[in-house]
């Protein structure tokens, strides 16, 4: 009987067929639910923060998960506020960079006993019951290592829009993940929507690369290009872009536009390496190049970075061929003309 229950819990109904039918008739499966309850996946939510005291005081932390705050030496009492709320807080020994604080979260998770990891960034919110929803999906699809859910996109509008990658639970293969990333851009959504198993971190496949703006997008592409993912329609939480300082500062910058196109380029290259057709690859590159030129020139006049930044980025990202076509002298001249125009105004 124990072997029968194990087979039923594994979801292999095709093999166990009449046995599962018999178990349901004998009312044995309700007892199996008790086993499911005892072995339900453990989920920990990591919260990298810096000087977010107002949000720390008001953000709801729904039950169903453990929460760990990684405070990057805040000076406004953020760590103390979370500690008073009973949340585990780890304060960095030295001031880390933004991505280094994320990496510290992942290193801690890799050494913990938790199975699954979620993200919560300052300004965002987690939907109540979403961790239980995630567990249901993981028990239904036990081979999953990366789970991608839906989110509400709050950009300051009266009613945040619900953004879904799929309309029903669907396995996304590495080829499909790369194809969508190259064609559509960041279809995964913000870090809030990604839940990953500890094995993903231990394998070293979830890497932020050399990017600042597109770090989470690159990590999603690089990991799903190896492992694939399960995409589900359930809502994980709300991305509050209107309250995210980094997002508001960078969203219209040339840096953000260039890095996004660079990750699309990377996705197209991985698609080809995974067995995609050369013609499809070439068509995607043509589309990416067209979009990159369009966005670069749209934002060129209001460039917020020195031309040296573009040269540095060109030397270490896949868009270097595009950027080399933009001479630094031309960029410097355009910026000088822009400054003169502003001074006259």
Image (tube, rainbow, N blue to C red):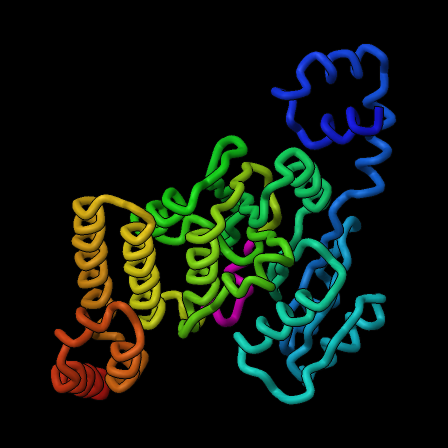
Percent x, y of residue 27: 85, 16
Residue 341 in sight in this render: no
Which residues, given as a range, are shown in magenta? 239-248
Nearest the camera: 159 or 40?
40
Q: Report x, y in % for residue 40.
A: 77, 43
Give the quadrant of the C terminus: bottom left
Foreground of the two, 312 or 335: 312
- At horizontal 47% and vertical 62% (from top left) the residue drawn is 219
Residue at 32% across / 79% down in the picture? 304
Assess whether residue 246 is covered by the magenta stretch.
yes
Residue, x 48% and y 43% (percent of image)? 163
Left or right of 241 in this view: 197: right
Q: Is 170 displayed left or right of 303 in the figure?
A: right
Query: Is residue 86 placed above or below 16 in the rendered structure?
Result: below
Front-most of 190 and 77?
190
The quarter of the picture where the N terminus appears is top right
How many marks the image carries: the answer is: 0
Asked if the magenta segment contains residue 319, the reply would be no
Residue 29: quarter of image: top right
Is there any visible trace of residue 144 in the rendered image? yes
The secondary structure making up most of the magenta span is helix
């Amino acid at each position: 009987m124990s072997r029968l229950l194990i087979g039923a819990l594994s979801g292999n109904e095709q093999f166990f067929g009449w046995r599962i039918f018999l178990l349901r008739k004998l009312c044995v499966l309700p007892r199996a639910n008790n086993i499911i309850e005892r072995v339900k996946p453990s989920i920990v939510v990591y919260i990298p923060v810096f000087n977010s005291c107002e949000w720390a005081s008001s953000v709801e932390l729904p039950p169903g998960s453990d929460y760990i705050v990684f405070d990057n030496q805040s000076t406004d009492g953020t760590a103390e506020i979370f500690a008073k709320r009973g949340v585990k807080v780890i304060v960095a020994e030295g001031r880390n960079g933004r991505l280094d604080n994320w990496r510290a979260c992942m290193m801690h998770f890799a050494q913990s006993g938790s199975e699954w990891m979620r993200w919560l960034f300052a300004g965002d919110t987690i939907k109540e019951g979403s961790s239980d929803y995630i567990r249901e999906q993981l028990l239904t699809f036990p081979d999953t290592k990366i789970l991608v859910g839906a989110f509400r996109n709050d950009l300051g509008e009266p009613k945040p829009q619900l953004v879904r990658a799929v309309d029903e639970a669907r396995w996304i293969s590495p080829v499909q993940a790369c194809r969508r990333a190259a064609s559509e851009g960041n279809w995964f959504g913000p870090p809030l929507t990604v839940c990953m198993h500890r094995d993903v971190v231990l394998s070293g496949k979830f890497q932020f690369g050399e990017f600042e703006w597109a770090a989470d997008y690159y990590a999603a592409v690089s990991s799903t290009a190896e492992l694939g993912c399960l995409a589900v329609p359930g809502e994980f939480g709300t991305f509050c872009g209107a309250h995210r300082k980094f997002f508001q500062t960078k969203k219209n910058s040339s840096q953000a536009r260039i890095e996004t196109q660079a990750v699309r380029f990377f996705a197209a290259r991985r698609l080809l390496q995974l067995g995609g057709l050369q013609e499809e690859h070439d068509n995607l590159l043509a589309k990416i190049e067209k979009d990159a030129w369009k966005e670069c020139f749209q934002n060129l006049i209001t460039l917020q970075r020195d031309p040296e930044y573009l040269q540095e980025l060109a030397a270490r990202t896949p868009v270097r061929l595009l950027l080399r076509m933009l001479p630094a002298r031309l960029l410097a001249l355009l910026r000088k003309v822009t400054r003169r125009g502003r001074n006259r105004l």
